[in-house]
Image (cartoon, rainbow, N blue to C red):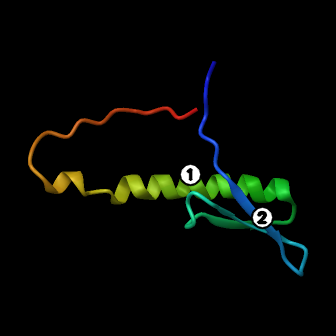
Amino acid sequence: MKKGVNLTALIKQSKSGKFIGQLQEFPAVLSQGDTEEELLHNLQDAFLLLMESNRKDNKLLAKGEGKITKRKLSLV
């Protein structure tokens, strides 16, 4: 059986009727949508963009000495 990572979307409906959301575990991931379904899709896209950006920006290990090994880690 596959186990996945479950994230929590915090959702609020604005006065204009739009849905605004944020991932509780990753507060930098914010988005909005006309429906809850659209919001959840947009939050997923925003999360994937954040992960891609982090991959490009992460140079912490590269500053030290020694060989760096990359391995894929599936969370789904």
Quadrant the N terminus occupies: top right
Which residue lies most toward the bottom here?
Answer: 15
Question: Which residue is at 61% across, 28% downward?
Answer: 3
Residue that numbered label 1 is attached to: 48
- In the image, residue 66 above or below residue 24: above
The earlier-in-sequence mark between 1 and 2 is 2
Q: Amino acid at mark 1?
A: Leu
Q: Of residues 52 and 19, which is closer to you in this image?
A: 19
Mark 1 crowd level (few <14, some 14–19, many ≥20, 10 Å Cα): few
Question: Which residue is at 83% across, 53% downward?
Answer: 37
Q: Is residue 19 visible?
A: no
Q: Where in the figure is residue 20, as x and y percent of width and height?
A: 76, 69
Q: Secondary structure at mark 1?
A: helix
Q: Secondary structure at mark 2?
A: strand
Residue 11: assigned label: 2
Q: Is residue 72 left or right of residue 27?
A: left
Q: Where in the figure is residue 62, as x and y percent of width and height?
A: 19, 52
